[in-house]
Image (spheres, rainbow, N blue to C red):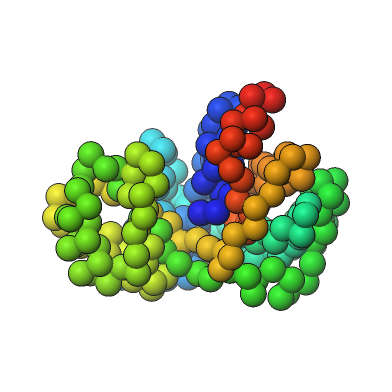
Amino acid sequence: MSGHSKWATIKHKKGALDAKRGKLFTKLIKELTVAARMGGGDVSGNPRLRKAISDAKGQHMPADTIQRAVKRGTGELAGESIDEVVYEGTGPGGTLILVEAMTDNRNRTVAEIRKIFERNNGLLGGGGTAGWAFERKGQIEILKSAASEDQLMDLAIGAGADDYEDNGETWLVTTPPDALMRIVDAIEASKIAVKESSLAYLPKAKKPIEGREAEIALNLLEALDDHDDVQNVFADFVISDREAERIAALG
């Protein structure tokens, strides 16, 4: 995911990845609510909701919490209106960043996101600042122990995936955004477990950064991701393995 996956690895080493369970639940609940509002409460006709419920169960969210979030989305229970917003900005070294957020107060959230950018040598821009540098894609992660390369080629590519790549301990399959859940279903129907699936903004070109710029850029992504209203953060930079190890060692 260019920068993003390596950033997650660094955060994990620093002990900061999803450190607060409550904050993760907040993000999952917002996705459940919005998915139900956008596509209805029937999972058979709402792939986004089906994935949101699967993600919530994967984090051991109680069933009644899931049901309440879905009912708020469908209007069966009262609740605050939540809007989806994508913010675009620039970071250190001319890096480009997209931030997916869900908020019940756009004015508050945009002011807080702007401050985070400014505190980390970045700048929140308007529409078109960074979006042109990314394309929307589906991504599926499969443990290498679950499928051979030949199986992956026959199944995923045969089902309509764009491509796949070696991602260390996993295969990373890239799909058209509207085909993500169909391809996930095809893989799982063949008794191959999917480790994770998501919609992502992938950079059309990767920008290598290092040194202090890399440190500040990672701090910016971490601060954005830590905001309660932020669901996902995507960046167009890439960091070498050696640089990633150096930054991780800083603690």
Residue at horizontal 65 percent and vertical 58 percent from the top: 207
**Closer-to-camera residue (31/71):** 31
x, y (%) of residue 121? 84, 50
x, y (%) of residue 101? 63, 58
Q: State the count of labels.
A: 0
Quadrant of the image occupied by residue 226: top right
Q: Residue furthest left?
A: 190
Residue 54 visible, this angle: no
**Closer-to-camera residue (86/11):** 11
x, y (%) of residue 230? 64, 52
Quadrant of the image occupied by residue 10: top right
Residue 130 visible, this angle: yes
Asked whether, in this view, residue 58 is left or right of residue 157, the answer is right
Residue 202 position (above or below residue 69): below
Residue at horizontal 64 percent and vertical 30 percent from the top: 246
Asked whether, in this view, residue 132 is left or right of residue 194, the answer is right
**Closer-to-camera residue (129/36):** 129
x, y (%) of residue 17? 56, 34
Q: Which quarter of the figure is the C terminus placed in? A: top right
Residue at horizontal 27 percent and vertical 43 percent from the top: 144
Residue at horizontal 77 percent and vertical 59 percent from the top: 94
**Closer-to-camera residue (139/114):** 139
